[in-house]
Amino acid sequence: MDRLEIALQVLERPPDFGWFGDEDMFETWGLTMSNAINSDDLINESNFDVACMRLEQNFGTAQEQYGPNIEIIGIKHWAVGSLDQIAVRVVKEDSDYCHHIDDRDFKDVDLITEKDLTQEFLEIVDMMEDIEVYPLLDEDHHSELEHYRTVEYIDMEFCNYSDGTLGWAEEVAGFCYDVGLNPWDDHIDIPMVIEALLWAEMADLDNEDVIEFIDENSGVMERIKERKWLDAGQQVLTA
């Protein structure tokens, strides 16, 4: 699909789509990349954040964060809940197409040519095409977001098992990464990891010694008694 075809698709109002904003939407403006609020899709969230940062950097002004041709708007959708979505002016204001709308009060998309498309819209199309080739716009940003969300998850879900030490959730996440555990895996017993790390700290052990420490001290930790270690090329903690 070429850029003009994408533009025409973006300008087409979806069926049964309730829109109560500016009248320019689906005439000269359209909706593009989106991110579902409170979603666990970190790849999409990262790409959306990176896209917004690039648009701000390339088109933002002192008066408008993303410039006059871009807005980040909130939308409620019956199927996916609340969304943040990038709205963009697709067609330049001085195009024959826009003059035709002003004069005749209806749109004739046949008047749109590729030279009429805004730089902002073309930038978004470029990023969407990049994602089709490789799923991440910025690997470093995704890694940082994944780490942040992991620490946040551990801190919120397992705070009752910690000793309250500043940075404890970061330490647990770091240990999991070091020994090849996925903290989001339901089979990983995070409370056991926390308890093991607390015992290891008392024994003045480094993270890499915690696995051996657990084996040696499992008899004194009630939560560990019902667990077992499996060796499948790496140490994996499983319920």
Image (cartoon, rainbow, N blue to C red):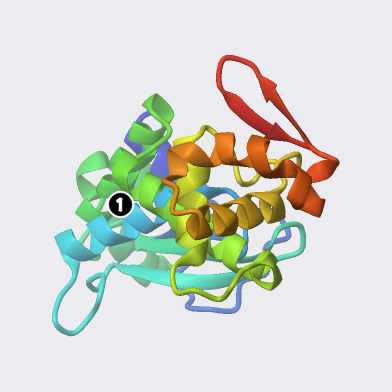
- What quarter of the picture does the N terminus occupy? top left
Residue type at mark 1: give it: Phe
- Looking at the rendered structure, the secondary structure element under dot 1 is helix
* Picture quadrant of residue 72: bottom left
215 to 152, vertically: above or below: above
Q: In the image as oriented, which residue stretches furthest toward the bottom?
A: 63
**Residue 165 visible in the picture:** yes
Instruction: Rate crowding at label 1 as few (under 14), some (14 to 19) or many (20 or more) other CA atoms within 10 Å.
Output: many
Q: In the image as oriented, which residue stretches furthest toward the right?
A: 226
- In the rendering, at what x and y percent does residue 156 appear? 63, 69
Q: Is residue 207 left or right of residue 239?
A: left
Q: In the image as oriented, which residue stretches furthest toward the top?
A: 233
Residue nearest the observer in this picture, 128 or 13: 128
Residue nearest the observer in this picture, 148 or 114: 148
102 to 114, vertically: above or below: below
- What quarter of the picture does the C terminus occupy? top right
Number of labels in the image equals: 1
- The residue depicted at 70 percent of the width and 72 percent of the height is 160
